[in-house]
Image (tube, rainbow, N blue to C red):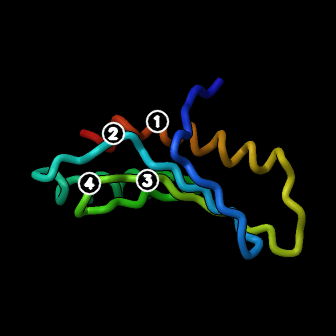
Amino acid sequence: EISCSLVGSEMCIRDRLIRLYSPLDVQIDEDKRFEACVNICRCSCELDMGSFDYDLYSGSIEFRMATSFNGSLISDKQIENMISYTCGVVKKYTDRLCS
């Protein structure tokens, strides 16, 4: 069972593409922002789907993933899977991204 809050997350359905954005509840201290880049990149490379976006100036991080359903229909289960995967990624990586 995954327990995760997607407060502030946004799901966009446009141009036959579903995009899911989930900001992490973290703020990288200004004096650690450059060294955090390597850690965030390393974590993104471990993912099967999606990636972390990092704003170097604000220190904020968000998880982003997308899937295309061009020429097909998307089911409720596929959307549930995207949300579940996002919750799992956010839960697994939040602490690692803060260190």
Task: Tell me where residue 84 sits by quadrant.
Answer: top right
Q: Amino acid at mark 2?
A: Arg
**Who's the residue at 51% across and 46% down the image?**
8
| Residue matched to label 4 | 59
Mark 1 in CB contact with mark 3 (< 8 angstroms)? no
Height in image: 90 above or below 40?
above
Mark closer to the observer (4, 1): 4
Using the image as rendered, state which of residue 44 and residue 17 is in the foreground. 17
Q: Residue at x 43, y 56 (%)?
A: 52
Residue 78 at x, y percent in the picture: 78, 50
Viewer-nearest residue: 7 or 22: 7
Q: Residue at x 82, y 45 (%)?
A: 77
Q: Is residue 19 above or below residue 62?
A: below
Q: Are marks 1 and 2 in contact (CB under 8 Å)?
A: yes
Question: Viewed as shown, does residue 63 lie left or right of 18?
Answer: left
Q: Earlier in the sequence, mark 1 or mark 3?
A: 3
Distance from disc 4 to disc 3, alpha carbons, whole Å, reads 10 Å
Gap in angstroms between the C-alphas marked 1 and 3: 13 Å
Q: CA distance from mark 4 to mark 2?
A: 15 Å
Residue kind at label 3, given as amino acid type: Glu
Query: Which of marks 1 and 4 precedes in the sequence?
Result: 4
Q: Which of the two discs, 2 and 3, labels the residue nearer the N terminus?
A: 3
Kindly identify which residue carries mark 1: 92
- How many C-alpha atoms fall within 10 Å of the one at disc 4: few (<14), some, or many (≥20)? some
Between discs 4 and 2, the one toward the N terminus: 4
The residue that mark 2 highlights is 96
Amino acid on which disc 4 is placed: Gly
Percent across and percent down for residue 80 are: 74, 43
Position of 35 relative to 4 (above/below): below
Q: Secondary structure at mark 3?
A: strand
Mark 3 lies on residue: 62
Q: Which mark is residue 77?
A: none
